[in-house]
Image (cartoon, helix red, strand yellow):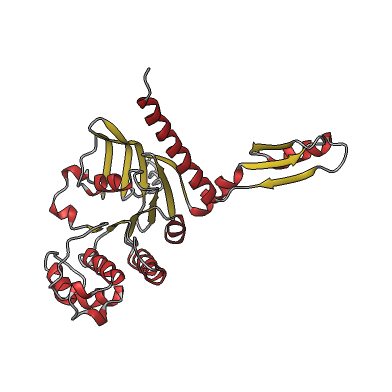
Amino acid sequence: MTPPVPTPGPPAPPQPVIRAREVTMAYGGRPVLHGIDLDIHRGEVFALLGPNGAGKTTTVEILEGFRRRSAGEVHVLGTDPERADDAWRGRIGLVLQSWRDHGRWRVGELLAHFATYYPDPRDPAAVLALVGLTGQAGQRVDRLSGGQRRRLDVALAIVGRPELLFLDEPTTGFDPQARHAFHDLVGRLARDDGVTVLLTTHDLVEAERLADRIAMLVGGRIRACGTPSELARLAAARAEVRWTAEDGTPHREQTEDASRLVWELHRAAPGPIAGLEVRRPTLEDTYLRMVHEEHDATDGALDGEAQPR
């Protein structure tokens, strides 16, 4: 009797482009990252959102292989960045907060020169068109505006056809028009070319506009992670109910079931409830609360250290 042919199971899910588990980092004994976990998938725009000093740049530098972590597990494009080779580095593109100028180069010449470092580069002219710099091809780099120079940074980062693009605070100092154009460019890279993008920002509006998912990094910890709509629903789940008692005393109560609390108040009240109001926080409210709580906790720890035992 012929044995039955086994039915193949479902295909294994694709591995994340970036996978980090329990990543910690300390400088001189001072902890900066406290167990970072990340999964970032192919073709996704992922925002690491947090205030200055939250650990965003440190996290990105670890993922890029520029900084050794204190502990934890990291795989980027299937490789531990600490042991990556030049072939791996050719698969990523970097746009950092600061960059070394090549002021005397002309834009087109500089991009064509960078293209020679890669085995299968994009056509430099096509890249200039993509980032909106065709008209500046013959212009010296030091004559570009801030927004144009940032677009040139992206051109240099993508000319080698990277699978993964790191953007560290990419629109700092941009005017609104330049920021909008840059956002459109990042969206096209992910949508049309399948580039995975990890960007850091302290701007919630930028994160909501650009990212498929957002991780809120505050005080070296990821406090929340999800799509913008998921995070908004999470923020609104906990409401504050306010009302005024019969004797004129104001009350407020935090609750995750505002409708039940309002129903109980009406059942117990002899008549209309004065000043009854339900306030649901926005995602911005929640983000700012996290930042303020971390700031207060840090100040308290410092104050405690300064005081004698």
| Horizontal side of residue 289 vs 279, given as left or right | left
Q: Nearer the viewer, residue 159 or 135?
A: 135
- Where residue 135 sits, quadrant-wise, is bottom left
| Horizontal side of residue 206 vs 76, given as left or right | right
For the N terminus, give its image quadrant. top left
Asked if one can make out residue 288 in the rendered structure from this viewpoint, the answer is yes
Classify 203 as above or below 287.
below
Numbered disc total: 0
Residue drawn 64% across the image and 39% down it: 256
Residue 42 pos. (x, y %): 34, 55
Asked if one can make out residue 12 in the rendered structure from this viewpoint, the answer is no
Residue drawn 21% across the image and 60% down it: 99
Residue drawn 56% across the image and 46% down it: 235
Residue 108 pos. (x, y %): 18, 76
Residue drawn 26% across the image and 50% down it: 77
Classify 244 as above or below 191.
above
Classify 284 as above or below 155.
above
Q: Which of 172 and 64 is in front in this view?
A: 172
Q: Nearer the viewer, residue 246 or 47?
A: 246
Residue at far right of view: 270
Residue 230 pos. (x, y %): 52, 50
- Where residue 138 sits, quadrant-wise, is bottom left
Residue 86 pos. (x, y %): 13, 53
